[in-house]
Amino acid sequence: MSPAEWDALRLSALVGLGAVALALPPAVLLGHVVARGSFRGRALLDAVLLLPLVLPPVVTGYALLVLFGRGGPLGDALALFGVEVAFTWRAAVLASAVVAFPLAYRACRLAFEGVDVRLVGAARTLGASRLDAFLTVTLPLARGGVVAGAVLAFARSLGEFGATMVVAGNVPGETRTLPIAVWSTLQAPDGLAGAWRLAVIASVLAIGALVAGERLARQRAR
């Protein structure tokens, strides 16, 4: 592999970890709220949270560019603090996190739905607060789903292309992740062999992440 390909591999791993760190906390929180809530608009909220799963990634990337680009409300606000998002590594992490969030959220929601509410009620009757009951009963019982959600989010981020390309661009060493490197390599007249090599590496990484996550989830579920 060339140094540029190693950079793309390293960047994809870092972006994937950053996307998980950004997407998992709200996925856990909102997954619990939707799983246990009985409020009006619950179905609509669930649909909105899953929306990036069915939207074309290019549309998601365009929405992020409008929000975080120059002239965008969040982009201008962050610029006041000297933070640039669009066409930086931050944009790559943000795009991957948004696209991967529905997978993490759905796994967490299903895990919380599977927790026996009687166990939570027993903890509350013994004096535990809502937060204590969540941290000591609900979350440990749902940890298998949370782990699965984190792994799915990481694997999805490894394959993210469309949204990242729109909001982060194709900057070597900065935003050129593995999928974008595959696309860039295919543009060269003799780039087919290099593109195959990168595609195989991306596939192996994704499969490895899924297998490792499945084993980890099963171990924690015991």
Image (cartoon, grey):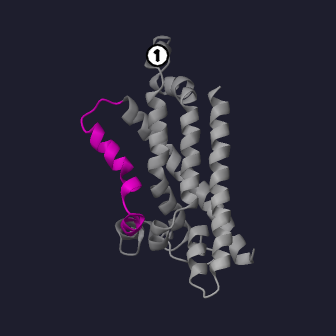
Camera sees residue 83: yes
| Numbered label tally | 1
In terms of image quadrants, where is residue 30? top left
Question: Residue extending furthest left?
Answer: 40
How far from the left and from the top, in percent, is residue 79? 45, 71
Where 128 falls versus 81 (above or below)? above
Left or right of 176? Residue 67 is: left
* Residue found at x 51% / y 26%: 138
* Residue found at x 60% / y 86%: 188
How far from the left and from the top, in percent, is residue 63? 36, 66
Question: Quadrant where the N terminus lies?
Answer: bottom right
Local secondary structure at mark 1: helix
* Magenta-highlighted residues: 37-64
The residue tagged 1 is 124
What amino acid is labelled 1 in the image? Arg
How far from the left and from the top, in percent, is residue 85? 49, 69
Residues 144 and 197: in front is 197
In terms of image quadrants, where is residue 110? top left
Q: Main secondary structure of the magenta part?
A: helix
Where 26 falls versus 40 (above or below)? below
